[in-house]
Image (cartoon, helix red, strand yellow):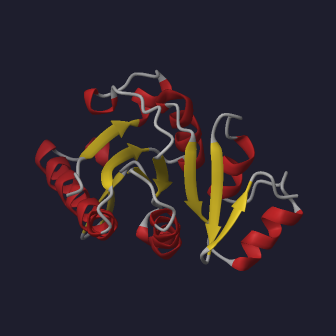
Amino acid sequence: MAMKRVSEIEEENINTRERTPALAPVKEDDDVVYVVISGEEKGGNRSMDALLWTLKNEVAEIFLVHVFPEIRFIPTPLGKLPINQANPEQKQILMEQERNKRREYLFKFLNLCSESKVKVDTILIESDMEAKAILDLIPILNIKKLILGSPTKSSLKKLIKLRRKENGVADKVFDKAPHFCQVKIICQGKEISKSIG
């Protein structure tokens, strides 16, 4: 049976290259793959396509990398209140609601890995700069295989034609990942690798 575990990393931990205890062992195994799971509003379907593609390619272990935005405001009946002006109880309630939303959203990805009998872990990163957070994580964890979903075929064509142009998160990571990291972008079940072009 596959193992499920959630590890949260704050953005400053990545910037200072510290690891949480759950992330201390750096994986060297070639069968370990990191799959980026975008937020539901940003591309849950493309993330699911990327995960399904990964599961078809016989892997022993998957790390789901989910970057979520920093919470800056608390919704109130009178509008948005900056989080630094909220009382501790309001902050705690909102943070717990957000954690529960993330767990619920990630459950379908975790469940799919478990059904496929693949060991799975989840890395959660709080950052407003998704591409930078992913790029910072690559050398920290020595990521050798990274899979991202691309939203549309038009985005796929742009990536092939204009490889230097940085449009979205997948494009930025694809373009700027270190040489030791093999980045694959999956668009509607089809793979793009860095060798295209």
Between residues 32 and 71, which one lies in front from this camera angle?
Answer: 32
Between residues 90 and 85, which one lies in front from this camera angle?
Answer: 90
- Residue 103, given in percent of the width and then of the height, sits at 24, 60
- Residue 131, given in percent of the width and then of the height, sits at 59, 47
View extreme (front): residue = 58
Residue 98: image quadrant is: bottom left
> Which residue corresponds to the image point at 20% horizontal and 61% vertical from the top-left?
100
Q: Quadrant of the N terminus?
A: bottom left
> Which residue corresponds to the image point at 70% horizontal and 50% vertical from the top-left?
174
Q: Is residue 68 visible?
A: no
Q: Quadrant of the C terminus?
A: bottom right
> Which residue corresponds to the image point at 33% horizontal and 57% vertical from the top-left?
118
Residue 112: image quadrant is: bottom left
Q: Is residue 22 left or right of residue 50?
A: left
What number of labels is visible?
0
Q: Is residue 145 left or right of residue 93?
A: right
Between residues 111 and 161, which one lies in front from this camera angle?
Answer: 111
- Residue 15, given in percent of the width and then of the height, sits at 49, 27
> Which residue corresponds to the image point at 45% horizontal and 60% vertical from the top-left?
37
Q: Is residue 155 visible?
A: yes
- Residue 57, given in percent of the width and then of the height, sits at 51, 62
Residue 160 position (above or below residue 141):
below
